[in-house]
Structures are given as structure tokens and as C-alpha cells.
Image: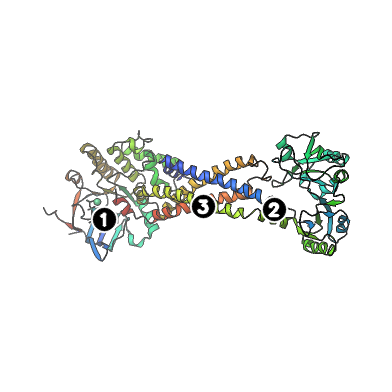
Amino acid sequence: MKFASLIVANLLRRKLRTGLTLVSVTVAFILYAYLSAIRVGLSQGVDVAGADRMLVWHAVSLAQPLPLSYLDRIKRIPGVDLVVHQSWFGGIYQNPRNFFAQMPVDPEPFLRMYPEFLLPEAQKQAWLRTRTGAIAGRATAERFGWKVGDRIPLQTGIWTKQDGSMTWEFDLVGIFDGAKQGTDTTPFYFRYDYFDETRRIGKGLVGWYVVRVTDPDLAPQVARAINEEFANSSAEVKAESEKAFLQGWAKQVGDIGTILTAILTAVFFTILLVAGNTMAQSVRERTEELGVLKAVGFTHEQVLGLVLVESCLLSGLGAAVGLGIGRVLTAAGDPTGGALPVFFFPPRDMVLGAGLGVLLGLASGALPAWQAMRLRVADALRRG
Amino acid sequence: MKPAAGDSSSALVQVRGVEKYYQRGTERVHVLEELDLEVKRGEFLALMGPSGSGKSTLLNLIGGLDRPSRGSVTVAGERMERLDERGLAAWRARHIGFVFQFYNLLPALTAARNVELPLLLTLLGRADRRRRVELALSIVGLGHRLKHHPAQLSGGEQQRVGIARAIVTDPTLLLCDEPTGDLDRTSGEAVLDLLHTLCRQHGKTIIMVTHDPHASARADRTVFLYKGRIVDAIPA
Ligand SMILES: Nc1ncnc2c1ncn2[C@@H]1O[C@H](COP(=O)(O)OP(=O)(O)OP(=O)(O)O)[C@@H](O)[C@H]1O
Ligand SMILES: [Mg+2]
């Protein structure tokens, strides 16, 4: 610690240069925070997917419906703990750009299936009482300024009602929060019984099933049993774990993750050159000073350490400030207005970023520090 | 011509058969040849000679900043070829104070911080370091300039800060390479007075390289170096 003033004084002797380098490093880490959040958004939910949940859908495509009667048959398969169904509604709220998912479900088992959706008990009871009731995730409720008690109209091009109308109105009886940071709180759920009764076509059909197994280890066997149960039937099915399904979706989005990594690599390489150049210049212009330090008794290793600590301080400070700002900025949520329902800077990436900051410091300081260490006093002072 | 080898108790510095050469390509450049020198404890020695005669090289060898190609350098009973790099650094910190022609203060640090540098390597606490720094700066007459940065000091004052840095660890031996070389007569005189006082009143042994006969006149003895050898007088 007694060397602190020496190190700080060295960093401050060229305030502009140190400042500019610091800003570069900071900007790089803000970018890092953003790209991390985007990556999370693109692979949304994969990290928080339940290991014990499986999706069962029509073997031909996700768009093909399955009969509601499959529910009881799946329930009877050994290893199955709970089954719920979901369907795609695809309605429009005011404007097609206001995209969010809407699905009819069976409220009671649905809420048991998804314990990560936190809904106050009173609101749950209200939902069970109200046939036209619906619940919305916090993100969507806040996005449109909805309050419990509001009537939410959704336009649809598919689900004509018995009365011929294409506008469905739901009573918002609850707003749910996510138990984890990665929980998607954009969807909107309403009651299947009301939906099925009111729609003109497609009665008795559902979009897909979500199955919870008693033991995650049994998932592959249960999946096989489900596939076999409906083999050779009119609608064959395909069962897959929730995680695998979400990963598959993320892959479809494209290898954007790879592109993000490439961008980050390029950014950090540039920053490495910037910080490395700053350190190299700083060491070069201090040759005599480093010689003096050695003359008064600093060892080669101590001089190496001084330079390394200096570069780590520079990069570390830039990283800390950048990660901090990135954290605050990404906390504002999805910047795209709907395309990335899950958008946050995960703590794991924050820790990784801190490590990256230290690594940057070591890498940018390595060569100058090594030169400083090798410097012979007699040569260093000869230049004076 | 020198005291017998056995009589080493009074010799603080013993240079024996030292040679120093540099390899420049295939050519070997001899800088010091067959050099013997003894400096007594408490002596104020001036080292003179033309540019390139090897004065700084010799000073560096005595100060443990460099190693001889052949021969041995013993200071305060320690044979320096026996010390490794780390041992040499520690030894320098304890026994040697360097004063340079261009002061070589760290511009980013205040006078007090500059003087404190060698103390950072000791186990002294903050308060002890502070006391020592203030004492050293008051000895050189700059007790009132603690917070000044080098750029705010005159050349003579900077050199006195340099001397304070050299004496702050209370070393046995002060090695000064042209300490007045960059100063006007008055400031140079003040620095010489200071070195003289350090030798007489504080018992420091001083080896001072100089081109200035005025400066060497203040020393107890003057040694002449010519083409890497000690001579009685510089040939005209
Ligand atoms: N690292 C080195 N490589 C090659 N030659 C060197 C090296 N260091 C010193 N020399 C040579 O050794 C000789 C003596 O140098 P030194 O610095 O000791 O002279 P000096 O007497 O101190 O001169 P001055 O009065 O100019 O300071 C010079 O000719 C110099 O070029
Ligand atoms: Mg010289």
C-alpha cells in the first residue's frame, strides 16, 4: 500500500492520455455489458428452463394442433407428474408492433406447472372465478400501463367468435412477476375454457402440451413413452425437453452469439492495443526513473510489479466503471421495444467481465513490465 | 604504493584487478583495465578524468549497478560478485546512496515523496518514514520544501533533494556522478559544502566524479582515470 502514491502519481502524470485510455476501456466494457444482455435476450429462457419440463407437440410442426384428449393419455404414462396444454392465440393489441405472446391455458394446473410465475393468491382466486379473466406478466403490464381491472381488447385474424366478431376482450385480473431474473414476464394468459367455448373453429384442439416429470433423470424415457403412445395415431407427437427446445429456437435465430463474440474479440483486441500502447509509452518515457528506482534498491521484480499493478489499475478501473454503467443502462430493460423480452446483464457475465478487466491489465502491461524488469540501471541512466 | 592487503579494516571500498569490457559485435571494447583502488572509511574521494575514461563505469561497479568482467569489488566487507541480483538490490538499498548529475527526481512526486522512495523498501512505518524524510531534507536545508514538485525547484535545490534521497537511509557510502556538473558556481558550491559536511560531521564516505578542479579541491584525495587506468596525473 505504501507504493500506492507512487503508482497513482505515475498514472496521473499524463492525465489526458490516462483519461482517454480509461474512456476507451470503459466504452469497451459498456459494449460488453450490452452484448451480454443481447445474448441473454436471444437465448431467452434457456438458462432458466426447468430441467424437469418437456414440451410435446405435433410431429409434423409446431403449428399443427393436438387433440385435447391426449391430456389424459399423457397423464397416465409412468413418470409423468403434471400435464398442461397451451395454444397460440396470436392476437394484436392496438398495433401489430405491440407484439407479446398470448395463450389460453387451464389456470390451476398451469400455475402449478410454472412456479416461477409469482401471482398473488387473491388474483389467482379472481382468475379462477372469472371466465373472461386474464393475467399479464409485469413487463407487458408496465409497457402498456395496464392495471388490474382493465379490459384488454385483442384483435385476431384467426379466431372468429361465435357471434362473428374478431375482437376478444379480457378482464385483467392479475399481474405476475418472475421468480428469477431471467424469467420472461411478457406473456399474457387467459382461460382455455372460455376460449374453446367462444371460438367458432378448432374446438377441442390445443397447441402443445407441457409435461412435468417426477424425476429429471426419467425425462428421456418418458419422452420415448409419449412418442410411442401416439405412434401410428392421426397426430403423432414429438416430445423434447424445454431446454433443448429453447436452445433449438436460439440456434434458429442464427449464430448471433458467435457474431457477438467476434465483435467483442475485435473490440477487446483494439482496447488491448490502446492500453498496451499507453503503458509502453509511459514506461519508455520513464526509463531513467525506473533506473533510479533500481539504483535505490528496487529489485527487478518489484519494478515489474509496479508496472503491472499500474496497467491493471488502469484496465481494472475502466472495466469497473464500464461494467457499472453497463449494468445501469441494461437495467432499463429491452431497448428494442419487444424483440428481446428478456434483457438483462447477468451477474455471471459481470464476474467474467471483471476477470476480463484484470486479464486486459495483465496483457497490456506484460510487455512494458518485462522491458522495465530487464532494464539495466547503468544503461537506463546513461541516457540522462 | 597501497596499504597491505591485510590492512582492510580501514578500507571501506576495495577494488582489485578489475577489468570491464563490452562486446560490440566481434570487437571487445575495454573500458577499465587492471584497476586497483581502495577508499578508506570516512574519506572524501574525487575521481577525475576525460570523458569516456570509465569514471561512471567504475562508480557503477562500486555501487553494485553493474558487474566487472574480471576482478573483485568489496564494499564494507561484502564481496559483490557473491550476491545475486536480488541480494545486490537489497545491499544497495542498505549501503549506497546515489547522487546523479541530472538529479533524476521523479517529476510526478513531491520532494518529500522523492526522498521517501528508498524508505519504501524498508520495514519502517509511515510516521518513521516521515520523520526520516524531514530530517534528511532539513540536513540539506530544504525542510520548508516538502510539498514542492521538482519542476517548482531550482537546479541546486533539486540536487539537494537528490542528496537528501541518497542519505535518507543513512548509507555508508555516497556515490556522486558529477553532482555539480549541471549547476552554476554558487549552487555547486552549496552542494560541495553539503557533501563536505556529510563527510566530516556525519561520517559518510564519498566518491565523487567531477570534471571541475574546484570541486576536486574540496576532496581529501583525487584519483585520475585515463583510458580505463588509474594514473598519477592526466597527460596534457
Ligand atoms: N553498455 C555499453 N556498451 C558499450 N560501451 C559502453 C557501455 N557503457 C559504457 N561504454 C563505454 O565505456 C566508456 C566509458 O564510459 P563511462 O560512462 O564510464 O565514461 P565517463 O568517464 O563516465 O565519461 P563522462 O565523463 O562522459 O561521463 C565509454 O567509451 C563508453 O562508450
Ligand atoms: Mg560519466
Which amino acid type is shown beneath numbered disc 2? Answer: Val
Horizontal relation, residue A107 to residue A5: left or right: right
Horizontal relation, residue B70 to residue A256: left or right: left
* Viewer-nearest residue: B83 or B162: B162
Mark 3 vs mark 1: in front: 3
**Quadrant of the image occupied by residue B35:** bottom left
User: Any atom of ligand 1 within 8 Å of the CB at mark 1?
Assistant: yes
Which amino acid type is shown beneath numbered disc 3? Answer: Ala
For residue A231, above or below residue A350? below
Which amino acid type is shown beneath numbered disc 1? Answer: Thr
Residue sitting at the far front: A164
Secondary structure found at label 2: loop
Q: Position of residue B106 (x, y in %)?
A: 36, 43
The chain to which mark 3 is attached is A
Instruction: Give the residue number, with chain letter if any, for mark 2.
Output: A46
Instruction: Give the residue number, with chain letter if any, for mark 3.
Output: A266
Instruction: Give the residue number, with chain letter if any, for mark 1.
Output: B57
Secondary structure found at label 1: helix
Q: CA distance from mark 3 to mark 1?
A: 48 Å
Q: Position of residue A219 (x, y in %)?
A: 78, 61
**Is label 3 in contact with label 2 (beta carbons under 8 Å)?**
no
Q: Can you say which quadrant of the picture contains the N terminus of chain B?
A: bottom left
* Viewer-nearest residue: A183 or A88: A88
The chain to which mark 1 is attached is B
The residue sitting at 23% across, 62% down in the picture is: B29
The residue sitting at 87% across, 49% down in the picture is: A203
Q: Quadrant of ligand 1?
A: bottom left
Mark 1: few, some, or many residues within 10 Å (few <14, many ≥20)? many
